[in-house]
Structures are given as structure tokens and as C-alpha cells.
Image: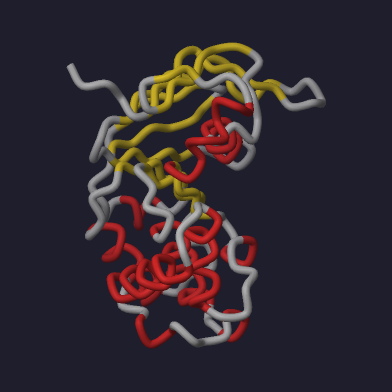
Amino acid sequence: MPIPLIALQNLHYHYPTGKSVLTGVNLNLFSGERIAIVGDNGSGKTTLLHLLLGLLFPIRGDIYIFGEKRQTEADFSPIRTRLGLLFQDADDQLFCPTVAEDVAFGPLNQGKTAHEASVLTREVLQKLGLSEYENRLTHELSGGEKRLVALATVLAMQPDVLLLDEPTTGLDVHARQRLRQELNDLSHAMIIVSHDEAFLSQLSVQYYELKEGVLQKREC
């Protein structure tokens, strides 16, 4: 039986105020799978993604990623680049003057040479149909363009899993369609947190609802 890329077992978390948000989350993500997580505002969807990255730590329960238990910062640090997080707000992900610099930033910080990072940048931009954006100023891009460039910054780090936090926020119809096409063309395992069920219905996903602190599988 294959080992899941991510396995969550009886995960509990409460905010510093004491409010419980996760009260026994269980989930397995296998290679090539796409899981959509829906739920009300404040139900803990983004918190769950942060737990997967070790940005927060559970009160109780176990997190297994790539077959190993992850409990401490030392456990999470070497795997963060293998979990590509697309932020809810693209402006939080893009901070360099040009598109090419933003996309190359991750590979350079992974230890790639300037030449290797440049090659990766061009390959990823070409794959997403963004080759002509290489020297564009990031702050001049539209919301949809920023979202695709943010996705390029994630893909350039060659992750095994994509964690997408409300990927369609602020996008118009055309940008949503383009993002859907690009995601459908990828083979990565994905966890997609979203309120946009119309968008999710156009992706091949398994649906889970985060409700009252637990994940419940549901039909599309």
C-alpha cells in the first residue's frame, strides 16, 4: 500500500485565546490526488495549511509528511520547499522588482546557481504562458497576472505538493479560467482551500468540509 505524502491523525488546535478550531482532523493525501477543503470563514482552513508547514504546531495529534513524523521546527524546516504554498494574497508572495527576480528568488535560496535559477525561471514562465512577463514590473501586473506569477514562484521551487489558499480571490472570470487550466495541466498532489465551489467543480478534486473542527468527506 502506498505511503501518503501527508497524513494527519486526530489533529487538534486552539488559538491563543483558547478557542478550539480543530478538534480531531484526519486526512491522507496521496501522490497525484487533489483535495478541496471548503468551510465557513473562521473554520480553520488556513490554520490547517499553516500546521502542515510547521508555522503552527498542534495541541494534540500527529502530522506525517513524506512518511516521517513532523513535530519540531527542525522536522519541518528541510521539507518546506517541497510543500509549495500559494498565499491567499499574491501581494504577500511577490516582493521583488521584476517577475523574473520574484520567480528566481526561491531557487536561489535553495542553493541553485544564478544560471540554474535563470533556466528554471524561464522554463516555469514558459510553462504558464508568461514568457513575455519576464522583465515586467511586478507591481504593474493585474490581479490575475500576479496570481499566475505567484504560482510560478511556487513551481520554480519544484515542490512535491501544492497548498493553495483561496486561489481565486480577487480574480475576474478570464483569470479564473486561466488559473483553472494551468492547475488542471499540473500533475502535483494538491490541497486547495477555497470558498469558490464553482471553480473547484472544474477541477478533479475530492471534497472535504471543515465543520465543527473536523473534516467530513462530501460529494461534489
Q: Is residue 37 above or below residue 16?
A: below
- In the picture provided, is 138 more to the left or to the right than 121? right
Give the quarter of the image for residue 41: top right
Q: Is residue 41 left or right of 184 when viewed as pictured?
A: right
| Residue 126 placement: quadrant | bottom left
Total marks placed: 0
**Image x and y of residue 36, in percent:** 37, 41
Image position of 101 with respect to 208: above or below: below
Residue 37, position in %: x, y?
43, 38
Looking at the picture, the colour scheme in use is: secondary structure
Residue 186 lies, with reference to residue 141, above or below; the image says above
The foreground one among 140 and 124 is 124
161 or 157, nearer to the observer: 157
Viewer-nearest residue: 126 or 22: 126
User: Which residue lies at the image location 43% right of the left edge and 62% below the top edge?
Assistant: 151
Left or right, 77 with reference to 157? right
Camera sees residue 43 = no
Q: Is residue 138 visible?
A: yes
**Which residue corresponds to the image point at 82% horizontal and 26% vertical from the top-left?**
17
Between 19 and 111, the one lying in front of the other is 111
Residue at the right extreme, as displayed: 17
At x 37%, y 52%, the residue is 158
Q: Quadrant of the C terminus?
A: top left
- Image quadrant of residue 154? bottom left
Quick check: 191 above or below 64?
Answer: below
Image quadrant holding the N terminus, namely top left
User: Where residue 174 appears, x then y in whole percent?
Assistant: 36, 77
